[in-house]
Image: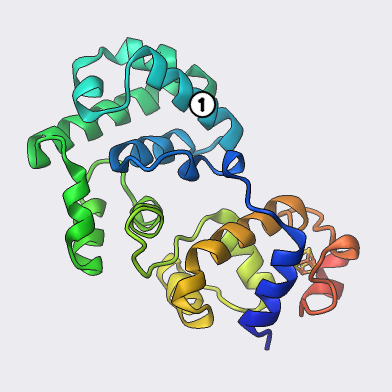
Amino acid sequence: MLRSDELLKALRREFKINHKDFVALATRDPFELLVATILSQNTSDKNSSRALEELRRRVGTSPENLSRASGEEIAEAIRTAGLHRTKAKALRKLADEVMRRYSGDIKRLLAMPLDKARRELMSLPKVGEKTADVFLLFLGEKPTFPVDTHIRRVSRRLGIAEGSYEDIRKSLMKFFNPKDYLEAHLLLISLGRRYCMARKPACGICPLKDICPKVFEERG
Ligand code: SF4
């Protein structure tokens, strides 16, 4: 079985993490991170970053600003993210709930123990397990491992994790050292975007071709 140190070594050699490529790295503001994650659903990070920028400029991204704005104003500002009306509704709902429950201050969740904070986040509208884990790992440096579609696919091909969201999260938390969770998360996504695509993975030029157990099978 692949070792985490050899995997990370190969990935570090190949990829430089660029903040512009990950919308969740574009902010240190806890509520804005939730906003960014909702905007990034079903679209590229490039489109969602543009929508976030526009939302900041036209409406603001605090819970106060979003709960005061009209759905139409928000939808117009986030048009480039796609599904803009649905996402605008989701943002309003989330902002209202954060105002009601925490008087707009969601940062206090970062002071809670991991499992409690995770449960609390996941009880908010439109915040699922991945968003909760991104929030806790990226901002709170809590030991959890968010799983997105790229991570699910590359982990299965690399033979390091498979199954439900929770199965994959737990396997990756065992496989990697906690100090590497954030970097490993970003590197696996980079691998999935550039080489290990869902259709036609580029095994022939992949930096992991000498250590990946699926290389021949997937090359087809
Ligand atoms: S060798 Fe192929 S299957 Fe393995 S990680 Fe690279 S692209 Fe994916």
Position in image of residue 205 (x %, y %) = 89, 61
> In terms of depth relative to the viewer, which is nearer, 167 or 180?
180
Residue 215 is left or right of residue 127, and the answer is: right
Q: Quadrant of ligand 1?
A: bottom right
Where disc 1 sits, the SS reads: helix
> In terms of depth relative to the viewer, which is nearer, 24 or 80?
24
Residue 93 is left or right of residue 170, and the answer is: left
Residue at the image position 25 percent from the left and 41 percent from the top: 125
> In terms of depth relative to the viewer, which is nearer, 100 or 59?
59
Which residue position holds label 1?
81
Quarter of the rendering occupied by the N terminus? bottom right
What colour scheme has been applied to the protein in the rendered image?
Answer: rainbow
Position in image of residue 120 (x %, y %) = 19, 55
Residue at the image position 63 percent from the left and 71 percent from the top: 156
Is residue 137 positioned above or below 181 on the image?
above
User: Which quarter of the picture shows residue 87?
Assistant: top left
Position in image of residue 154 (x %, y %) = 65, 65
Give, as a three-letter code, the residue at label 1: Ala
